């Protein structure tokens, strides 16, 4: 076997290489632990969701903020889990107030994925994160090979200490952040910017368009610009949990050959409802809702009409 390069005779060089190898060991342990340990699902509601564009040194970067509040009232920084770029509200429908299910590793509490009613966003297994970990492991293996090349017992002390330091430092750096305290900002209101009744001006100065011209009781046929007539035939029904989400269905009778307009379910409580593209029960409109929602109105978007769900005709 050829002699090692002269530079490896310097203890600090060999120590730096072994420290890199120690960092690779820590990453490997975390990766294997997350892959083999069970997972837990945490129900939460998005409390912050924004993207800020920054410019510097000839390039543009995006700073993502996605924070959720768990059922226990604690904040989770989802974008801080290593893949904020995959958690943009446009990519996963993670608007403020949307219910989500967060999958975490029981090994270290790391956020593995975030599921909204319309999409699932992988976090710890996202391509850029996997690529980074593979790169770290390749560098660590190479560093270990050079670090032990021509190993001498006379210089064993510094490399071993450096390896331990590399393991401990990397463990601190990649350790998932603990859950925060109570939410810094109040959760959005389930009226989604509409007044009660929705014919009034919006209480939110940024949502002045959130109002309708008329509110009709349940059982009233409403003609739409899409060539169909909609009638809410009964009170909304709270369903079970579908994929971890609480659902509410509104029974509808649809007459005509056109398509139904998009709808928004609003009411008292916190958070935002999400209309599902398909409903398991025929003749209904289905929504994923926060647990504390009490349905009040079904707003037909772009039709300037809301149907009062607690006022039978």
Image (spheres, rainbow, N blue to C red):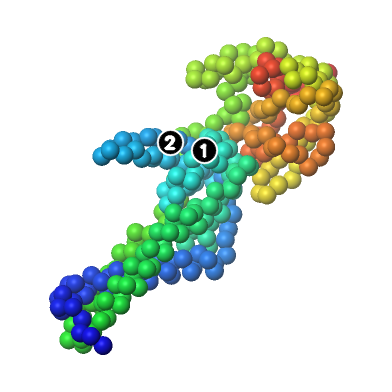
Picture layout, residue 16 above or below residue 179: below
Instruction: Give the x, y percent position of residue 100.
Output: 58, 44
Which residue matches tag 1?
89
Q: Report which quarter residue 117 is drawn in.
A: top right
Picture layout, residue 103 above or below residue 278: below
Q: Crowding at label 2, few (<14), some or many (≥20) Cα neighbours within 10 Å?
A: some
Residue at position x 32%, y 72% in the image: 142
Image quarter hosting the N terminus:
bottom left
Foreground of the two, 217 or 16: 16
In the picture provided, is 131 more to the left or to the right than 242? Answer: left
Residue at position x 57%, y 29% in the image: 189
Residue at position x 57%, y 65% in the image: 38
Q: Earlier in the sequence, mark 1 or mark 2?
A: 2
Foreground of the two, 276 or 292: 276
In the picture provided, is 72 more to the left or to the right than 262? Answer: left
Q: Secondary structure at mark 2?
A: strand
Q: Secondary structure at mark 1?
A: helix
Do the numbered discs 1 and 2 sit on residues whose CB atoms are within 8 Å?
yes
Instruction: Give the x, y percent position of residue 244.
Output: 66, 49
Image quarter hosting the C terminus:
top right
Residue at position x 66%, y 22% in the image: 301
Instruction: Give the x, y percent position of residue 187.
Output: 53, 34
Residue 51 marker: 2
Q: Is residue 239 visible?
A: yes
Q: Crowding at label 1, few (<14), some or many (≥20) Cα neighbours within 10 Å?
A: many
Instruction: Give the x, y percent position of residue 207.
Output: 53, 20
């Amino acid at each position: 076997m050829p002699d090692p390069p002269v530079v490896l005779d310097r203890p600090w060089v060999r120590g730096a290489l072994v420290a890199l190898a120690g960092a690779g060991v820590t990453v490997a342990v975390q990766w294997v632990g997350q892959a083999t340990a069970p997972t837990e699902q945490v129900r939460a509601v998005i409390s912050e969701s924004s993207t800020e564009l920054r410019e510097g040194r000839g390039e543009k970067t995006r700073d993502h903020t996605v924070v959720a509040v768990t059922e226990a009232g604690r904040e989770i920084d989802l974008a801080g889990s290593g893949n904020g770029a995959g958690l943009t509200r446009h990519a996963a429908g993670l608007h403020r107030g949307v219910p989500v299910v967060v999958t975490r590793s029981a090994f270290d509490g790391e956020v593995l994925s975030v599921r909204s009613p319309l999409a699932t966003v992988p976090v710890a297994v996202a391509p850029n994160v996997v690529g980074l970990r593979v790169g770290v492991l390749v560098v660590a293996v190479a560093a270990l090979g050079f670090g032990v090349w021509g190993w001498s017992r006379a210089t064993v002390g510094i490399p071993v200490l450096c390896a331990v330091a590399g393991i401990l430092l990397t463990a601190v750096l990649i350790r998932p952040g603990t859950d925060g305290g109570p939410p810094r900002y109040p959760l959005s209101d389930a009226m989604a910017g509409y007044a009660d009744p929705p014919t009034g001006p919006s209480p939110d100065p940024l949502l002045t368009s959130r109002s309708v011209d008329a509110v009709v009781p349940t059982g009233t046929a409403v003609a739409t610009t899409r060539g169909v007539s909609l009638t809410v035939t009964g009170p909304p029904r709270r369903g079970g949990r579908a994929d971890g989400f609480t659902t509410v269905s509104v029974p509808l009778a649809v007459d005509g050959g056109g398509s139904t307009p998009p709808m928004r379910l609003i009411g008292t409580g916190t958070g935002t409802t999400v209309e599902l593209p398909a409903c398991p029960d025929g003749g209904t409109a289905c929504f994923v809702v926060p647990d504390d929602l009490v349905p009040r109105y079904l707003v037909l978007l772009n039709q300037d009409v809301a149907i009062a769900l607690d006022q039978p005709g």
